[in-house]
């Protein structure tokens, strides 16, 4: 269950130095914002921040942006951020639907989607972060060799996502219906949800995909 209504969360976020508040003005200028030419990776639906925080720690030569829609959830990530001394991690509070307003063509090196909202009702399929509509958005901002990596415990969402990859003109690269029992797990970073679901015995599904129209070698 997502936290949505912590009193004062918006005010805390508005005053936090690690949250970008003029994100549309940064479009095409993210390297200038970070002050480096390091590649930029984003996590959409960053939740409480455990995954992207550890990713930033392990990769000080790369830059990261966590995107979260809900203020009260982002607040938890910012609580963790205060203990991280690196300068390669920022956050944005926004709806991913507007991602093309924030990132320019070829500006993003890779995208992570972790335990995204399944939107189980069929009429809401377009809202799923792995719908063909979103794959098209990702294709507009990713570099030619960019990848999207997706993890979920929801088998129905995973099956839907596999189908949408092809429908959007993308190609699957890696697929596992049980990530923790596969060789893809070697450098895996677990999210808070992943830790909980794994303890409960749920297999974690995983895939990476790339845009077929721009098939250059690379990985995330």
Image (cartoon, rainbow, N blue to C red):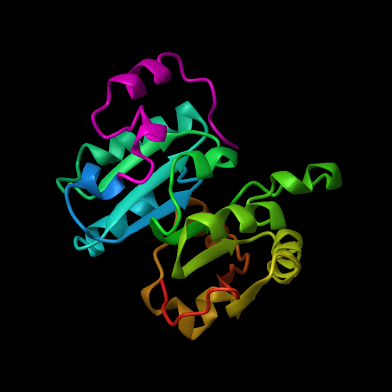
Q: Which residues are magenta?
A: 1-29
Where does the image place residue 114, in percent across and percent down from the top left? 52, 56
Q: What residue is shown at x 43% (from left), y 49% (from top)?
A: 104
Q: Is residue 204 above or below residue 94?
A: below
Q: Is residue 50 above or below residue 216?
A: above
Picture quadrant where residue 200 is located: bottom right
- Number of labels in the image equals 0
Q: Is residue 6 above or below residue 67?
A: above
> Taken as a whole, is the magenta stretch helix, strand or loop?
loop
Q: What residue is shown at x 47% (from left), y 85% (from top)?
A: 183
Q: Does 93 sit left or right of 2 as displayed?
A: left
Q: Is residue 172 visible?
A: yes
Q: Check residue 24 for magenta coloring.
A: yes
Which sits in the foreground, 108 or 119? 108
Where does the image place residue 13, in percent across and percent down from the top left? 35, 24
Q: Is residue 114 visible?
A: no
Q: Does 17 sit left or right of 50 as displayed?
A: left
The quarter in which the C terminus is drawn is bottom left
Q: Which residue extends farthest bottom?
A: 183
Picture quadrant where residue 174 is located: bottom right
Q: Check residue 6 for magenta coloring.
A: yes
Where does the image place residue 12, in percent across and percent down from the top left? 33, 20
The quarter in which the N terminus is drawn is top right
Which sits in the foreground, 213 or 76? 213
Q: What residue is shown at x 68% (from left), y 68% (from top)?
A: 165
Q: Is residue 148 above or below residue 44?
A: below
Which sits in the foreground, 184 or 197? 184
Where does the image place residue 77, in percent across and percent down from the top left? 36, 39
Q: Which residue extends farthest right?
A: 122
Q: What residue is shown at x 56% (from left), y 60% (from top)?
A: 139
């Amino acid at each position: 269950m997502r936290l949505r209504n912590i009193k004062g969360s918006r005010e805390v976020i508005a005053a936090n130095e690690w949250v970008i508040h003029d994100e549309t003005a940064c479009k095409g200028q993210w390297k200038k914002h970070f002050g480096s030419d390091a590649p930029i990776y984003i996590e959409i639906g960053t939740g409480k921040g455990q995954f992207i925080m550890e990713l930033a720690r392990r990769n000080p030569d790369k830059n990261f942006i966590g995107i979260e829609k809900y203020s009260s959830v982002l607040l938890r990530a910012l609580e963790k951020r205060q203990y991280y001394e690196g300068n390669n991690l920022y956050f944005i509070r926004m709806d991913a639907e507007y991602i093309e307003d924030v990132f320019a063509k070829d500006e993003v090196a890779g995208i992570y989607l972790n335990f995204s909202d399944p939107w189980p009702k069929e009429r809401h399929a377009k809202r799923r972060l792995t719908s063909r509509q979103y794959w098209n958005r990702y294709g507009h901002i990713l570099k030619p060799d960019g990848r999207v990596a997706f993890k979920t415990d929801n088998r129905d969402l995973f099956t839907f996502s596999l189908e949408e990859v092809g429908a959007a003109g993308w190609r699957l690269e890696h697929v596992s219906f049980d990530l923790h029992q596969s060789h893809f797990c070697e450098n895996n970073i677990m999210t808070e949800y992943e830790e909980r679901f794994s303890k409960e015995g749920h297999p974690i599904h995983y895939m990476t995909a790339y845009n077929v129209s721009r098939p250059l070698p690379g990985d995330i």
